[in-house]
Amino acid sequence: MNTFISFILFTAISSAQWALPPGTPTLQMRYPSTPWISPGDTIKQPDALPIPCISTLNLNAARTYLLLFVDIDVVLESCSTTVLHWYQPYMTASATSHCNGNENGWLVNRTSTGAEYIAPQSPPYTRHRYVYLLYEQDPDYVFPECFGHIFPPTREGRGGFDIKQFVEVAGLRAPVAGNFFYVDNDAATTTTTASGGLVPTTTWFISAPCRTEEPKSTGFIPMEATYEVDQQQVVT
């Protein structure tokens, strides 16, 4: 890892749990039952059950976009890791969506299902950071088949998602917008059991069998830090 990236990661880790690359424009988004979300806001878990409403504000309406949605506060067997909740390519501007009340238009997908949306499901009595990263998708974009394991909405398929590797092999540049929020789980809306907060002792990601000797991307990724969360967070 070069000195510049190391510095950026250190800065992100030490900046009050900020979860976006420095300087990333805010992705204008909300859920059907919430106000517009600012980075660092907190929402209730039930509010994030449907797919979000994403505005085209400050985006180039002529471009195609790719969206990643991840939980960066997961612990599996004492290892901090990232879980992929949604991969959606081929997002384009539209005047209509499942949401309303936005004069700027919406970013939607009408051609590809991607890796289906999994709603936030942090364990009882925890607060996880959920991060949206939006990338411009070039016309010659090809999904890296070595990441084919992400499509089933399972622990094995989504756990340990390596954003850095995906961005590199997919040839993505730095995100053009992003947002993150905390999801509170007060244990009243879930049947998942929990053993309390766990302190990770290392970091774990699945290394997809991709050829990355010559990375195609200089895209930035969110921090890979240590988090205090419960190991039963992941998709069931």
Image: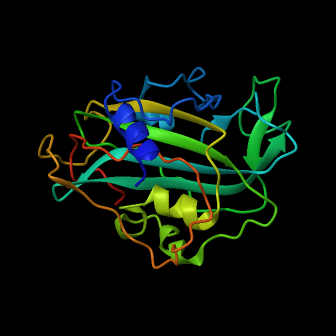
Vertical arrangement, residue 79 with respect to residue 170, above or below = above
Question: In what quadrant of the picture does the C terminus appear?
Answer: bottom left
Residue at figure coordinates x 39%, y 43% from the top left: 223
Please provide percent x and percent y for residue 45: 40, 35
The type of colouring in the image is rainbow
Residue 49 visible to the viewer: no
User: How many labels sit on residues?
Assistant: 0
Does residue 180 appear to the left or right of 25 in the view shown?
Answer: left
Q: Where's residue 111, x and y in %?
A: 78, 61
Determine which quarter of the picture holds residue 129.
top left
Towards the viewer: 10 or 52? 10
- For this orientation, the residue located farthest to the left is 195
x%, y% of residue 34? 56, 24
- The answer to whether 188 appears left or right of 56 in the picture is left
Q: Quadrant of residue 36?
A: top right
Query: Horizontal and vertical percent for residue 229?
Result: 22, 42
104 lies above or below 214 = above
Q: Where is the N terminus found, in terms of image quarters?
A: bottom left
Q: Could you tell whether 3 is left or right of 193 in the image? A: right
Q: Residue lying furthest front in this view?
A: 3
Does residue 11 show up? yes
Q: Residue at x 60, y 72 (%)?
A: 144
